[in-house]
Image (cartoon, grey):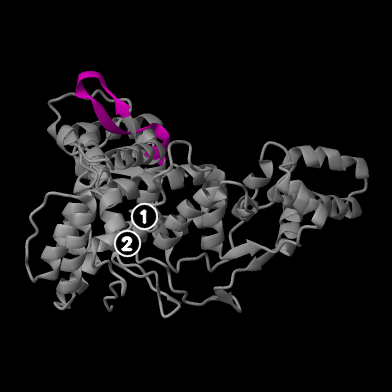
Amino acid sequence: MSLMLRADLPQTKEQVKNNTLTTYFPINTKDRKDIFNWDSVLGYVVKTSFRKELHLEKLSDEEKQAVKDDETSESKIALEKFKTSCEKSFKTKLDESEFWPVLEKMYFENDQLYKISPEFLLFKTIKEKGSARDASLGGMFANQLQNFYFDKKPNNKFNFLENELYSELLKLMKLSKEVIEGKLTISEASEEPYLPFMAKHLQQDLRFLGKRPKYLLSIFKEFLRLYAHLYTAQLALNLKGWQKGEPEAQLSYYILDSEKASDERYLVKDYGYNQMYQALWNIFPYLSMNESLQSKKIDNAVNTIQPLWVLAENLQQTPSSAILLKNYAQAFKESRELNLTLSGSENPQDVLADLLKLSRMQFGAKESRHEINKLYVKATESEFCSHFAQSRGRAGRVLVFNQDYLLLLTNLAIGEQEKVRFHELIKSFQSRGVFFDKQSQQALICFFERIGNVERMSDSGDAVYVRKTI
C-alpha cells in the first residue's frame, strides 16, 4: 500500500483552505437535526448489498416540468408507473377486475409495498430534493461493506399476490455495473474501512439477516441505526489512537434502560456517555485533516482514501515526506493564527501529530471556528446517539440499550448458532463495542429469563445459555 500525499499540499498560509470532510463520516458542517431520511438510506444499503438497481424509463418533458414545479417527484412517478404495470398484470390473471382496488389498498398504501421484500426499497433511492445527505450516509455503510454482496437468491416466501408484485419488480431491476454474468467484479472502494473490526461485523450480521428477509425487513431501520451509532462511538474513541495501528473495540459501557444509574458504577461513569461525548469533538478536526493530506484522484484515477492510522504507518516508511508536512504545519499554523510550538522533528509521525493538534486547536473555545465544531458535535449526537443516551438525574447522561435494540443485538451476536453461553454472548457484544458491567450483566440475565430465552443449568454464569428470539 503506497503513500500518496497530495501533490498540491499547501506550503504557504495563502494556500491553506477551509476545512472540509466528505470521507468516513456523513455529517457536514451545515447539518443540524433530522438530517437523514432513513427509509431512503435503507434503499442505498439494499442497492449496495444486493448489487441491484432500478432501470427506469426516462421522464417525458411534461413529467420533468412537473418535478421542476414541485407538483410531484421522480419517485412518485416511478411508483405510479409500477402500480399501473401491476394493475395490467393482475387484471389479465384475475377473474374479477374489480378486485384490483382491494389489492391496491393492501399493497400501495401505508408503505406496505416495502414490507414484501428488501428490493422494493430500491424505489427509495430515486433522487429527491435533499437525497444527497441520504446518499452520503448510504456511502458510509457502502464503504464498510466494501465488496460484500448477497451472492445467493434471497429466501423469500411469497404468497401468490406478493409473487406477482415481485415478478413485476424484476422487470425493472438490473444488476449494477459491478456484477457481470452474475459475478461481482472487484471495484475499488473510495475509502478503506476506518474500523476493520466493525466492517467485519456489519458484513457478518447483514449476511445473517439476508438469509431471513422477513426478519430483516422488520428490523432493517433499527439495524442501520444501531450500526451507525456503534460506528460513531467507536470511530470517535479510536481516533486519538492513530499511532497504535489497527483500531480495536474500545471500552464503552451501557446500561439497560430499565436499570438505575449511580455514581458508584465507575465503569459506566468513566467509560460511558461522557467519554464518548468528549471524543465526538475529535471527529471533524481529525478526519478533515486526514482528508486534506490525501488526493481523491491521481492521474484522473480514483485514489482510495486511507484511515489516519494507515496514513501514519505509511508516513513512517517515507521519511522524505517530513519536509512537505512541516511546511504544511507551519502554513496551517499561520493561516489559523494559532499559538503552538511545533516539534521541529524530522519524523513524519511527529509532524502529523503537530498537524492534528493544530486542527483540534482551531476549534478551541476561544477560537472563531469553535461554533462550527460545536454544532457538528450536536448534529452527530442528535442523529446517531440520541436513541442510545438518557439523562439520569445526579448520575448525568448515560449510554443505554432499550429492549428492542438489546434483542436485535442479541440475535446478531448469537448469529447462526441456536444458543450460546452467556459469557460468550458478552464477549460478542464487546467485539462490537458494547460493554456491560457486572450489575448490568445480572440485569441482562433477569431480562432474558423474563422473556423465556434462557437455559440455566446452575447458578454459575458458565451454565447460562441464551437463545435467539427468531
Q: Residue at x 24, y 42 (%)?
A: 435
Q: Which residue is mark 1?
A: 20
Amino acid type for the residue under numbered disc 1: Thr
- Please rate how many residues cluster around mark 1, counting C-alpha atoms within 10 Å: few if below 14, some from 14 to 19, many from 20: some
Q: Which residue is mark 2?
A: 291
Q: Position of residue 401 (x, y in %)?
A: 34, 35
Q: Mark 2 or mark 1: name the one nearer the start of the chain.
A: 1
Q: Position of residue 335 (x, y in %)?
A: 24, 55
> Was residue 404 drawn as part of the magenta stretch in this picture?
yes
User: Which one is in front, 190 or 178?
Assistant: 190
> Was residue 134 drawn as part of the magenta stretch in this picture?
no
Residue 451 vertical placement versus 10 (above, below): above
Q: Is residue 468 visible?
A: yes
Q: Residue 451: which disc?
A: none
Q: Quadrant of the N terminus?
A: bottom left
For mark 1, give the secondary structure: loop
Q: Residue at x 56, y 45 (%)?
A: 39
> What is the magenta range?
390-407
The answer to whether marks 2 and 1 mark residues whose Cβ atoms lie closer than 8 Å is yes
